[in-house]
Image (spheres, rainbow, N blue to C red):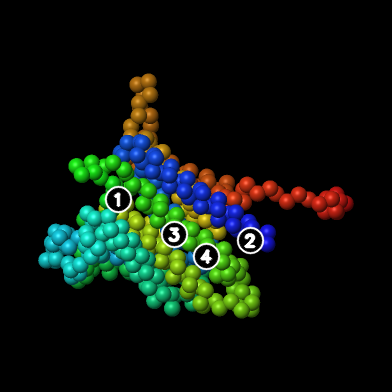
């Protein structure tokens, strides 16, 4: 009874926090200049936070060490891009191959990107299909790969990501994937800005959209973690033998966790394509997976709140706060040493090392934000006496 009340209170507070965050994003976006570096951090942070939480679901809550996140993001990005390029622009985008093999576009089916229903329904369906394609591939490779454990699983999923990246750059698939070239002319976050009859933007929603999608998806993941399936995932993480003895079907729950994580990684890939305004396979390297894994570790393995907080701190530090280190600086006529292009990443790497050294379990450990505001249980008189004795 008490636990149910806490869950309801937590859900209500989460809903209020989500509304406040979305409202704040809209206010900031329509108050500050659109060229502010803050919006790059907000957009990329929203996308990466979803992917980090999806990776945490698999690595942190189920105990499956996978390094295929970039591959599933690639699948999501390409699925979204291929399905949303307007028919009128396909010859321009696929000019090296004489046009696209797919002669339709989801937004065009609902009236085109210039209409609200065409943009919203077309993009929403494309994002959903992006996640489904990633989940389908996860199911296919999960059949043999999930039999492996620990480092072997990580190597197998990393190999899958690299193979997928090479296949999507294969020239024979050019009429579909555009080979090694970008797929452009796709609907982006700025497509959702509301304009008047003269074409002037009257309400900017380019940061609101990724936040809305990310919050909805993370809310679904949180509900899953707090369900009976989530408890089964945690049991598998703690002890597979004990979990199986309790009646948990290991193969079923591992596959379920793998597919769900990949689904949201695919959605994250679609959002990243919208953020970058294109889809190109060479972007989705193993380095991207390592970035996401680093965010999960910094935030705390097994903490959704930690992954979200660490994402925005990571993106802000790498994309905004340390930018001045890449430019020469003079103080009282003396040139500051070391400041040049690339020095920012040296300092950033040192900061990451310090954080990992002093926060071994991450910023949040396995706790969530509401746990920080709950009063610690007081020692009873009997326990205090035993302790003194």
Location of mark 4 (residue)? 224
Marks 1/4: CA–CA distance:
30 Å
Q: Which comes sooner in the sequence, label 2 or label 4?
A: 2
**Dot 4 alpha-carbon crowd within 10 angstroms: few under 14, some 14 to 19, many 20 or more:** some
Residue 211's x, y, as percent? 40, 51
Residue for point 35% across, 29% down: 329
Location of mark 3 (residue)? 217
Residue for point 65% across, 60% down: 3
Q: Secondary structure at mark 3?
A: helix
Q: Quadrant of residue 158?
A: bottom left
Location of mark 2 (residue)? 4
Q: Which comes sooner in the sequence, label 1 or label 3?
A: 1
Marks 4/3: CA–CA distance:
11 Å
The answer to whether residue 237 is seen in the rendering is: no
Residue sticking out furthest to the left: 98
Marks 2/3: CA–CA distance:
22 Å
Residue sticking out furthest to the front: 197
Q: Which comes sooner in the sequence, label 1 or label 4?
A: 1
Q: Nearer the viewer, residue 284 or 20?
A: 20
Q: Is residue 189 left or right of residue 60?
A: left
**Dot 1 alpha-carbon crowd within 10 angstroms: few under 14, some 14 to 19, many 20 or more:** many
Q: Nearer the viewer, residue 204 or 196?
A: 196
Mark 1 or mark 4, which is nearer to you? 1
Marks 2/4: CA–CA distance:
15 Å
Location of mark 1 (residue)? 192
User: Mark 2 and 4 residues: CB-CB less than 8 Å, in contact?
Assistant: no
Mark 2 or mark 3, which is nearer to you? 2
């Amino acid at each position: 009874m008490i636990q149910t009340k806490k869950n309801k209170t937590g859900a209500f507070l989460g809903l209020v926090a989500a509304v406040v965050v979305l409202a704040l994003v809209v206010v900031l976006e329509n108050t500050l200049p659109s060229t502010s570096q803050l919006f790059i951090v907000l957009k990329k942070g929203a996308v990466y936070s979803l992917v980090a939480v999806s990776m945490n679901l698999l690595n942190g809550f189920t105990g499956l060490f996978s390094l295929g996140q970039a591959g599933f993001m690639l699948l999501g990005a390409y699925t979204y891009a291929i399905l949303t390029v307007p028919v009128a622009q396909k010859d321009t985008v696929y000019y090296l191959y004489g046009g696209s093999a797919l002669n339709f576009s989801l937004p065009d089916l609902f009236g085109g990107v210039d209409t609200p229903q065409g943009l919203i329904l077309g993009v929403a369906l494309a994002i959903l299909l992006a996640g489904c394609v990633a989940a389908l591939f996860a199911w296919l490779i999960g059949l043999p790969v999930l039999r492996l454990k620990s480092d072997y699983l990580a190597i197998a999923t990393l190999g899958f990501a690299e193979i997928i990246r090479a296949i999507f750059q294969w020239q024979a698939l050019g009429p579909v994937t555009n080979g090694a070239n970008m797929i452009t002319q796709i609907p982006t976050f700025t497509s959702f800005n509301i304009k008047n009859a003269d074409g002037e933007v009257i309400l900017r929603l380019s940061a609101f959209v990724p936040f809305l999608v990310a919050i909805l998806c993370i809310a679904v993941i949180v509900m899953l973690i707090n369900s009976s399936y989530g408890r089964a995932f945690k049991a598998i993480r703690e002890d597979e033998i004990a979990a199986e003895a309790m009646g948990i079907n290991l193969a079923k729950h591992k596959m379920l966790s793998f597919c769900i994580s990949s689904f949201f990684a695919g959605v994250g890939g679609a959002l990243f394509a919208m953020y970058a305004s294109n889809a190109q396979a060479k972007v989705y390297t193993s380095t991207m997976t390592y970035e996401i894994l680093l965010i999960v570790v910094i935030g705390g393995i097994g903490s959704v709140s930690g992954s979200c907080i660490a994402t925005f701190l990571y993106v802000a530090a790498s994309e905004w706060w340390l930018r001045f280190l890449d430019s020469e600086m003079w103080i009282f006529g003396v040139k500051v040493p070391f400041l040049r292009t690339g020095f920012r990443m040296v300092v950033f790497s040192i900061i990451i090392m310090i954080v990992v050294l002093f926060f071994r379990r991450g910023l949040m450990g396995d706790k969530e934000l509401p746990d920080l505001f709950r009063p610690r249980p007081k020692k009873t008189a009997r326990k205090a006496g035993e302790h003194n004795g």
